[in-house]
Image (tube, helix red, strand yellow):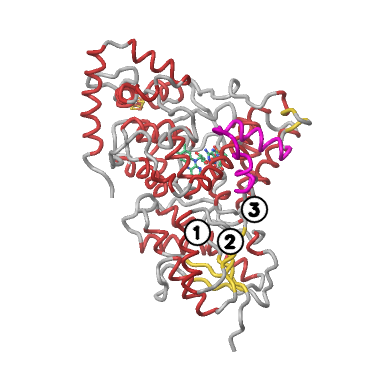
Amino acid sequence: MTRSIRNLVIVLGDQLDAGSAAFDGFDPAQDAVAMAEVREETDYVPQHKARIVLFLAAMRHFRDDLCGKGIDVRYTALDDPANRGSHRAEFARLARQAKPERLIVCEPGDWRVLENLRALADDLSLPLDVVPDRHFLCSTDDFAAFAEGRRGFVMETFYRWNRGRLGLLMDGRDPVGGRWNFDTENRKSFGRDGPGHIKAPRRFTPDDTTAEVVRLVDRLFPDAPGRSDLFDLPVTRAQALAALRDFVEHRLEGFGRYQDAMATGHPYLYHARLSTALNLHLIHPREVVDAAIAAYEAGGAPIESVEGFVRQIVGWREFVRGVYWREMPSYAERNALSADLPMPRFMWTGETDMNCARQSVGQLVDHAYAHHIQRLMVLGLHALLLGVRPLDVHRWHISMYADAVDWVSLPNTLGMSQHADGGLVGTKPYCASGAYISRMSDYCRGCRFDPRKAEGEDACPFTTLYWDFLARHRGRFHDNQRMTMQIRNLDRRDGGEVAAIRRRADALKSDFTKESYP
Ligand code: FAD
Ligand code: SF4
């Protein structure tokens, strides 16, 4: 005889935490869990094989953990012939079998998914409880309270507010170390000798469950971008904790100083590589910042590194999530700079003469990872200067990065990187010429282009497109105080020279966008 179910708890692929609010009051005798691998999620943009492997492998490990605790998990595999292919249809099928009195889900990380689940509850005429996501340090209500009554809000203000109220790295009302910001000590490049030896992040060799997923993905998605054979990301909570320990022990110390540096052959440098574990909820942001602060207190890492790291999580990560839920769904449509070109094909393949882009996309293809400065100041910068449709940049991002989830990718790509929200996430566009990349990396040394040149056969495309970008948007930015120097430098240039640069930029635009993907 099938038992009747009280609550059916829907667990999505980025909600893999048995301590989530969706499990509050969970009674294995009366309640059950529904999880589904659906083609809707793997196909809504073409996806990197490693990204699909990550989600499915982590979901299957989580399912096995729950089953080990005696929990009834209704799980649909991607290749199950009964699988209806979308959250709405597949959870409806599972719910019709389970006949629960109520559906429960933790706040999803994607507006589209939340809408689908609401539609599902309507289809089934069942109540749906959407419970708060405790995997953030600032709830959507807290963020609304912070934003209320402010004419504009910038990340720095939010960061100080959030850090202060959480009492993180605080000495009473003052920041530890006497300053909120150690940027002047940070942002160094490596110089001619390069970074030297930095211990690479710990790798997690696929176990049987993950290896089976790799085979499934190779079989079902032979033409998907990226590689699955190098997959080594953490897919369980135990692995995520091991990855955190590894970062704190071996890389946190240099994190701040070299936060903005790039180097050939070093995909991770001093970065944490914890974003996938955080975004799938295998590990809590509080655990991550507490571990970094404990290292500082034990003398294992300097304040500028620990503050820089805490800022990324307590500041940026929480801020973009607040912006996402406050501004959606219209946020996704914003295009303040009227950018209308498609994403160039090399962004998926790495086939380009531009060494900085070739190195960065090469890493993406291998590991579904590029660090922040490669995202912002190489690949995002190229799309910004070229004038790619911001939503396409976001969709490409979702397709190529293992850590991309709507709430975090959209404000970072459309807002921070493409300035398409008109200045909500960042008060000025992150625009720069090849000179910036040359200063912060060794890429230009191995490139056929010259970062100082905007014209001629060996002109750096970034430099040409940079001046074109400034000229194109001069009217919008000339009274932005943070852009004064850049606009002044443009105005110093000879008019005929600028016209020639712009002609070259037009040729580059048609060349870069003559082939797109898929
Ligand atoms: P580290 O550099 O070591 O930083 C530590 C942690 O801080 C990260 O794990 C992450 O959780 C957090 N963090 C740092 N910066 C940000 C930020 N701007 N927003 C949110 N969290 C931040 N991060 C994602 O998790 N998913 C995305 O889809 C994503 N898209 C991005 C798109 C663009 C264009 C840019 C510029 C940044 C994006 N980021 C995104 C933020 C950041 O680049 C990644 O979190 C980081 O590179 C992940 O690698 P890491 O764990 O080694 O991070
Ligand atoms: Fe990139 Fe230009 Fe430097 Fe080449 S010269 S690596 S294209 S910034």
Residue 1 visible in the displayed image: yes
Query: Disc 3 marks which residue?
Result: 134
Magenta segment, which residues? 138-167
* Mark 2 vs ligand 1: CB below 8 Å: no
Image point 59% across, 76% down: which residue?
101
Q: Amino acid at mark 2?
A: Val
Q: Is residue 426 above or below residue 231?
A: above
Q: Is residue 52 left or right of residue 470?
A: right
Q: Is residue 220 above or below residue 125?
A: above
The x, y position of residue 183, in whole percent, is 59, 24
Q: Using the numbered discs, state the Cα–Cα distance from disc 2 to disc 3 in whole angstroms.
A: 12 Å
Query: Disc 2 marks which residue?
Result: 130
Task: Specify which label sits upstream in the sequence, 1 or 3.
Answer: 1
Q: Nearer the viewer, residue 32 or 354?
A: 32
Residue 445 visible in the displayed image: no
Q: Residues within 10 Å of mark 2 (few under 14, many from 20)?
A: some
Q: Nearer the viewer, residue 163 or 177?
A: 163
Q: Residues within 10 Å of mark 3 (few under 14, many from 20)?
A: some
Q: Amino acid at mark 1?
A: Leu
Task: Specify which label sits upstream in the sequence, 2 or 1.
Answer: 1
Q: Nearer the viewer, residue 393 or 444?
A: 393
Badges 2 and 1: C-beta atoms under 8 Å apart? Answer: yes
Image point 58% across, 86% down: which residue?
2
Q: Quadrant of residue 414?
A: top left
The x, y position of residue 273, in whole percent, is 54, 43
